[in-house]
Image (spheres, helix red, strand yellow):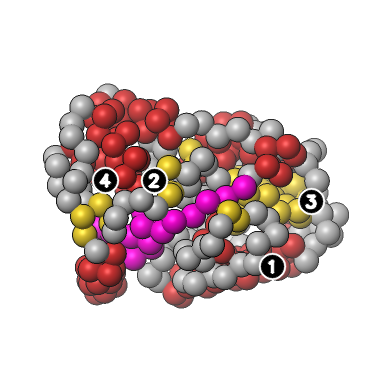
Amino acid sequence: MKIFLTGANGKLGNEVLNLIPSAIPLVRKPSNLKNEIVVDISNIKELKNILKSCDILIHLAGSMSFHKEKELQESNIALTKNLLYALPKTSKIIYASSISIYGKRLIGTVDEKTPVHPDTKYAKTKYEAEQLIMQRPNSISLRIGPIYGPQYLDYQKFLKLIKKGKFMIFGNGMNQIPFIHVQDVAKAIKNSIKAKPGIYLIVGKPETQQKIYEIAANSLGVNPPKNKIPVKVALVFASMMEKYSLLTGKKPFITKEHIMILSSDRKFNCKKAEKELKFKPRSIEKGIKEIVQSMER
């Protein structure tokens, strides 16, 4: 069985390669990955020749530059279209989609049959790519929650602020956040290889924003954040950071998407993935402790 992998240089891609070392990474420039193939993904002829023997394509590549619309279009939609043009009709696709396509204002518990409502540029591009992929009969789309883990520096940045007593709660802090550990996502991807085609939710057990900060503070040995900031005020600040980023080229410290992820109330039913993919995410307590331990090394 020949498995190809896009996005192998990313944090999730690295974890997938650890579990599926025989996967062949498709990369845009040399990166010293085992068995990698350097390819111009805009060159359909070259891509088609490379993928002619593909049994499974694990498609993780894409952009999470939430405030850069052109990059989102190119990396999430155009790239996906090129892969689909080049891929044999018999190939199976496993796609890393996102729960962002449901929108941020959810009512009740969401499952795979809940209508989607993408409400950001990022979410719209992820959903458009998913629609293209799911037109093929032998496809799997994993709608993944906010991923965290020791290698995600944004969360280390927030933990350092909690340790210094400088982090704030967005809104009242009672909203539930469904974080999912990167290694648990990688396991779900591996188990998708033999799974039935369809859509699966890959989301962690939700905890309230306030509880997550309490867990983090306890792991750090400090007091949890108490000060609160209205979500609207935080979004204005994040919008200013994004505009400054576009002018300077520097990565924004925090984006509107970050604020919405941390302040939105979202609950999901993952029973389908639990049954079909043997999905069993670790607790947020265990995951946060791993990040704190990595920071202390």
Residue 113 locus on image (x, y percent): 70, 59
The answer, for residue 141, to whether it is visible in the render is no
**Is mark 2 in CB contact (under 8 Å) with mark 3?**
no
Check disc 1: other Cα within 10 Å, few if <14, some if 14-19, many if 20+.
Answer: few
The answer, for residue 111, to whether it is visible in the render is yes
Q: Which residue is mark 3?
A: 197
Q: Give the residue type at disc 4.
A: Phe
Compared to 128, does 157 lie above or below? above
Q: Which residue is mark 2?
A: 208
State the residue at coordinates (29%, 64%): 231
Q: Give the residue type at disc 1.
A: Gln
Assign a secondary structure to mark 4.
helix
> Magenta residues?
249-269
Q: Which residue is mark 4?
A: 158
**Is mark 4 in CB contact (under 8 Å) with mark 3?**
no
Compared to 104, does 184 lie above or below? above
Q: Give the residue type at disc 3.
A: Pro
Q: Which residue is mark 1?
A: 131
Q: Give the residue type at disc 2.
A: Thr
Q: Is residue 164 magenta?
A: no
Which sits earlier in the primary sequence, circle 1 or circle 4?
1
Name the residue nearer the viewer: 183 or 115. 115
Compared to 106, does 167 lie above or below? above
Assign a secondary structure to mark 3.
loop
Residue 238 locus on image (x, y percent): 26, 66
Which sits earlier in the primary sequence, circle 2 or circle 3?
3
Assign a secondary structure to mark 1.
helix
CA distance separating discs 1 and 4: 34 Å
CA distance separating discs 4 and 3: 37 Å
Left or right of 137, for residue 226? left
Closest to the camera, between mark 1 and mark 2, is: 2
